[in-house]
Amino acid sequence: MIEFKVGQFEGALDLLLHLIKENKMSIFDIEIEKITEQYLAYIEKMEEMNLEVTSNYLVMASELIYIKSRMLLPKKEDIDDLGDEEDPRDELVHRLLEYQAYKDITDTLREKENIRKEIYTKAPEDIQEYLDQDTKLNMDISLDNLVDAFKNFLIRQEEAKPLKTKVTQREISVSDRKKKIRGILGSKKRVNFFEFFEDYSREYVVATFLAVLEMAKEKELKIIQDHIFGDIVCEVA
């Protein structure tokens, strides 16, 4: 006898698929008598435990009994348009195949949802405040050029990083990054802009980039590029 836990199925079709799989049957050649007995045993078990047997289970039970009775009758005029004898199980097989396809799609979507939960997303930052006419950044390179250089740097890092990455849940604030940058500048005085990026996770990169811009805006540091395509360096203002 198939062992199963009461309440583990999502409905009548789910239970049927389970019974077919456990009995190692083909979905196209269901042993109706055997499946019907096991299905009714499940309903009986639910009733013994005083659990509510929903209508879809009872409707399916009656359908199985009807199909079983038809298959026990002598073969007769159940002929389709092509002259072939109709199988009483055909409609049930069609419904089971549709439900199996639905379950497969649901499992795929659930897997994609779980993957999506591990991806950190952040709303786009508005850097327009750094472009206000009355607020001049302490840098001799345009913000557009700095952003382009930074984008190219991130592309190179993305191509070079290992295929296996670890998702981090730690929060990184702009103020924390400013403190760290002050410490670096306090010891080195002049630092390559990209040395501030020890980690390339999205939250770390965004917080660090904004920290550098804020410090340039507040005249704490100066961003310098001696010549086109040259190194971008930061030094204490």
Image: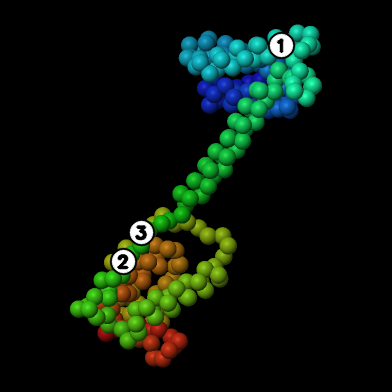
Residue 147, quarter of picture: bottom left
Question: In the rendered view, does 207 fall on the left or right side of 159?
Answer: left
Q: What amino acid is at disc 1?
A: Arg
Residue sitting at x 52%, y 22%: 7
The x and y percentages for residue 217 are 25, 77
Residue at the limit of the structure toward the left, as seen here: 134
Q: Is residue 18 visible?
A: no
Q: Earlier in the sequence, mark 2 or mark 1?
A: 1
Residue sitting at x 46%, y 49%: 117
Q: Which residue is mark 1?
A: 70
The residue closer to the viewer here, 29 or 136, is 29
Q: Earlier in the sequence, mark 1 or mark 3?
A: 1
Q: Which residue is mark 3?
A: 123
Residue sitting at x 24%, y 80%: 136
Residue at the limit of the structure toward the bottom, as seen here: 227
Label number found at residue 118: none
Q: What amino acid is at disc 3?
A: Ala
Q: Quadrant of the C terminus?
A: bottom left
Q: Is residue 148 visible?
A: yes
- Structural distance between the alpha carbons of marks 2 and 1: 71 Å
Q: What amino acid is at disc 2?
A: Asp
The residue closer to the viewer here, 37 or 198, is 37
Q: Residues within 10 Å of mark 1 (few under 14, many from 20)?
A: some
The x and y percentages for residue 199 are 44, 67
Numbered disc 1: secondary structure = helix
- Vertical arrangement, residue 125 with respect to residue 47, above or below: below
Residue sitting at x 45%, y 67%: 200
The x and y percentages for residue 177 are 33, 69
Q: Which residue is mark 2?
A: 126
Task: Give the foreground label among 2 and 1.
Answer: 1
The x and y percentages for residue 84 are 79, 22
